Each structure stands twice: as structure tokens, then as C-alpha cells.
Amino acid sequence: MDALKAIRYLRPSFFRTSGQQSFSNGSAGQVQFSMDFGPLRPLSELASLRTDLLYEVRYLDPSDAQNRFGVNANGGAAIVLLSNKQP
């Protein structure tokens, strides 16, 4: 099972869409993810990660996601940690 399927199965609420849909960015209002606190990525990229690489998965609500990643994170964000090191 890939990381996207595993997280969807274990935590389906992480991927609920919310927020404003009118930004020109196609991902506005969509949940995105950040790998090891890097830039936001589309959820589809999680399908290429194996579950044995995951250390931790956190969810940031839209407000916290915007504070960390800017206005284009208005749908919330999943933080995927591949190691136990934090910034």
C-alpha cells in the first residue's frame, strides 16, 4: 500500500477539501502536503511514497497551514515526516 492510500484509510478527515476556491492557483482550497516541512506538493505525489518510509503524519487546519505556508495553503496541509528530525 502506498502512503496516500494508507493515510486515506487511517485518517480520511485529513483530506477533506475546505476554504476559498477562487485563487488562480489550482490547488486553492485543496489539501496539500509537505514532506519534512518543505514546500507544499499535490496529494497525488503521496502515491509514490512507500508506507515504510513514513515516520509521522500530522494535519494542519487551514489557518495553521496558511500561517506556515502562506495563502495558497487555505485548504489545510498534511505534514509528512520521513525522519524524526524537526526544523
Image (cartoon, rainbow, N blue to C red):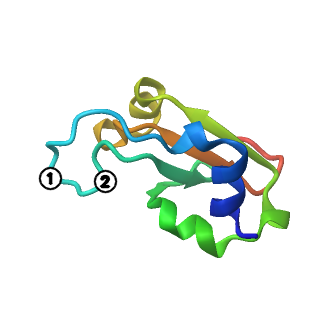
Asked whether the beta carbons under mark 1 and mark 2 sit within 8 Å of each other, the answer is no
Q: Position of residue 3 (x, y in %)?
A: 69, 62
Residue 53 visible in the current orientation = yes
Identify the residue at image location x=51%, y=45%.
15
Residue 58 locus on image (x, y percent): 66, 38
Q: Nearer the viewer, residue 57 or 7?
A: 7
Which labelled disc corresponds to residue 10? Answer: none
Q: Residues within 10 Å of mark 2 (few under 14, many from 20)?
A: some
Q: Vertical placement of 83 versus 11: above or below?
A: below
Residue 53: x and y in percent read 81, 64
Q: Quadrant of the N terminus?
A: bottom right
Quadrant for the C terminus in the image: top right
As drawn, 12 above or below 50: above
Task: Report the residue marked by disc 1.
Answer: 24
Residue at image mark 2: 27
Residue at disc 2, secondary structure: loop
Residue 60 to residue 55: above or below: above
Q: Quadrant of residue 52?
A: bottom right
Circle 1 SS class: loop
Mark 1–mark 2 distance (CA, rounded to whole Å): 9 Å
- Residue 67: x, y in percent? 42, 28
Q: Residue furthest top?
A: 63
Three-letter amino acid code at disc 2? Ser
User: How many numbered circles are shown?
Assistant: 2
**Residue depicted at 72% across the width and 57% down the height:** 6
Q: Amino acid at mark 1?
A: Ser
When asked about the image quadrant of residue 57, the answer is top right
